[in-house]
Image (tube, rainbow, N blue to C red):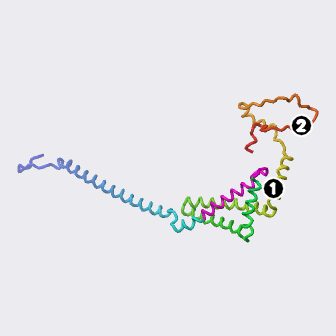
Amino acid sequence: NSSSNNGETASSPLSLRPSTTFQESRFHNSTTKTFDRLKYQQARSRFKTNSAEKYQSISPPNATTIMLLTPVDVSLCFHNIFNAFVLFAHLHPVESPIKKVSLKTVHDVVSPVHSIPYLPSSILAACVITAAISGRYAYETGDTLMLVRAIVAAYTFACTSIFIKLSDTMIKLGVKRTLDIEREVSQEEIVKFVPPNKTLCDTLIAPMKPFLRVDSTGLDRIPDDSSHLYVMNHSILGVEMPF
């Protein structure tokens, strides 16, 4: 403080500057915090709006769409179960006692279907249309459920195309003739069997030799003046089983 001419005490400008600067700083900080809070609220509001719009754009189909697509899913599921049974009947070994029974069942079920004009072609067309519509919807909306439905429909189309051809051949030949052909093919494969290369077998067996040991007895009693056929189980230590 400094004294004026009339004896009154007055504050110098330099003495007021710290107080004024402190008040301005508090005001500035308060304004800045308020502005930052408003910016945060606006950004949060925009984020909520964008999230809501994005959620609406990728939301699942409504109840009507789900009700319309449910029969499609049921039919695809039933169709693939039947395809699995047809595959089991055709790939089962011909020597199995249930081979004839399974083929007879497939024949009795498939024959009426093949007798209806254009029905097999309609089934294939339905699979293609379902795969195309579901795939396009999944591409546009990113719906995982529709993508799975498209994949299943495409898989059903591929399997059904093969099984329709197999079943058509079986219907034309009959169950008995189909079994006879499979037996002939099996016997022909046995007759034309060619053993694998010895070097290849030794390479495959090499990792198993430390764990498995093969003992042979009686080899000295086998004559070497004529040809022989050796028959044994797992002659290359079971390596052939996966194939």
Q: Is residue 162 visible?
A: no
Tell me how far mark 1 sits from mark 2, CA to CA. Answer: 32 Å
Highlighted magenta segment, given as a residue range: 72-97
Q: Circles 1 and 2: CB distance less than 8 Å?
A: no
The residue under the point 83% across, 55% down is 180
**Structural crowding at the residue carrying mark 1, measured as other residues with C-alpha within 10 Å and reported as few (<14), some (14–19) or many (≥20):** some
Q: Quadrant of residue 116?
A: bottom right
In front here: 125 or 90? 90
Where 129 falls versus 233 (above or below)? below
Q: Position of residue 154 (x, y in %)?
A: 65, 61
Q: Position of residue 192 (x, y in %)?
A: 86, 47
In front here: 120 or 143? 120
Where 42 falls versus 241 (above or below)? below
What residue would you read off at disc 1? Answer: 179
Residue 210 is left or right of residue 148, and the answer is: right
Residue 225 is left or right of residue 148, and the answer is: right
Q: Position of residue 82 (x, y in %)?
A: 68, 59
What SS does tag 1 mark? helix
* Amino acid under disc 1: Leu
The secondary structure making up most of the magenta span is helix
What residue would you read off at disc 2? Answer: 228
What SS does tag 2 mark? loop
Residue 216 is left or right of residue 127, and the answer is: right
